[in-house]
Amino acid sequence: MTTKAELYLFALSELEKSTGDIISTAIVTHDGLIMASTKSDTMHRETFAAYGAASFKRAGETMEELTGENIDVLIYESKNYMVVTVRAGMHALLIVLAGKNVQMGLVLMNTQKTAIKIKEI
Amino acid sequence: MINSLSLYGIEESIGIHVILSNLFWWTSLILVITAYKNRRIWNVGEMPWTYLFLTFLFFGIRELGHLTKSSLLDSIRYIFGICSAIFMTSALILIYMKIYKRKTTSKSMSFIPLMFALIFPILLIYLYFSGTKTETIKNIFFNLENFMWIIGSSITVYTTYMLGTKSTGDFVHVFMFFQFAAIFAILWKFLGVIGTISSPIPYSIREFMETLFGVCAIISMFILEKMLRKLSRHIS
């Protein structure tokens, strides 16, 4: 029998294949625990999950204070990297670390599609 | 004959605090073991888990030592307390290094706390066979334990503060209660030092601090274990 973890992993690998220049992806809880993640040479899995969840939480608090609404997507970028975090259901976040050789729109669209898939699992 | 000083909480006694303390620390050990089963979800490495396990195991043994009244066994009890302080400090330093500093600690570096902890039983054997009175040995290890817990817990207050400010969700509570535990450990041992160097502190105050130390430690482990168990059930 296929476990949820395996289904999550399959969704992540599909996202990586369809987008390109993705360095790492992970599905994490709001506590920063890993539900599923793809391998990354540049980052420790736990660090990726912990910082990813923490940044989403802080941004969510800011959004709530400023607009009174919940945050759904968080995007931040540097010279060579970008991070997209999307809410994937009530208890999970999908975090994507991508390089700059990919269009932001494509990353965002595919990440949101995958988040919907994860929600349905 | 009942010692009246013990009755009024002035001197050490075997009372409810010993039972509670043993209950808290041995239950915490079970929680660490059950949390360890889900270590793949929170993969902070083998050594932090080992040190967490040893912290609770050694402190549990230390608390069991309350049931004896021999000076030599008291010294051994203090050694278990010293080791527990070293391991608790090390576990949280390693977790901090791994998750928030992204530094992989080498195998040999990870064993330093274990080597450091080994000094104390050797010191006991040396003092015992060099003819030092058992009462003096007991006092030496009592003071050493006080200092180890004060230093170790001070470091733990710092690491848990750093971990807490960078983490989110229930991890904030895990590190917050660990920090509370460390603060109570500092107070408990600080009162012990004051009692040794100047005015005696009623034992009931110290035992209250020690019990609170145990309460915070068990809450912290309970939150961690619950978090891992819940997620493990969700993804399986």
Image (spheres, coloured by chain):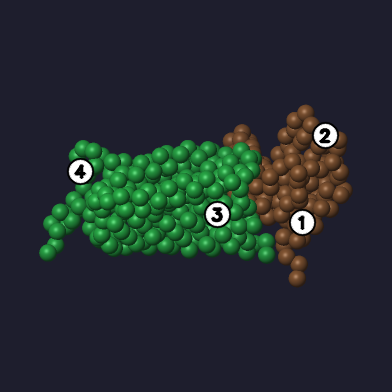
Type of amino acid under label 2: Lys
Q: Which residue is mark 2?
A: A100
Numbered disc 1: secondary structure: helix
Q: Are marks 1 and 4 on the same chain?
A: no
Crowding at mark 4 (Cα within 10 Å: few <14, some 14-19, many 20+): some
Of all chains, the one bearing label 4 is B
> CA separation, marks 1 and 2?
24 Å
Task: Assign the C terminus of chain B to one quadrant of the image.
Answer: bottom right
How far from the left and from the top, in percent, is residue B88? 47, 48
Residue at point 75% right, 61% down?
A6
To which quarter of the image does residue A71 belong?
top right
Q: Name the residue tied to disc 4.
A: B200
Residue B207 relative to residue A102: left or right: left
What shade has chain B been given?
A: green
Q: Which residue is mark 1?
A: A9
Rendering coords of residue B228 (x, y %): 58, 58
The chain containing the residue under callout 2 comes to A
Say whether disc 1 or disc 2 marks the residue closer to the N-terminus: 1
Palette colour of chain A: brown
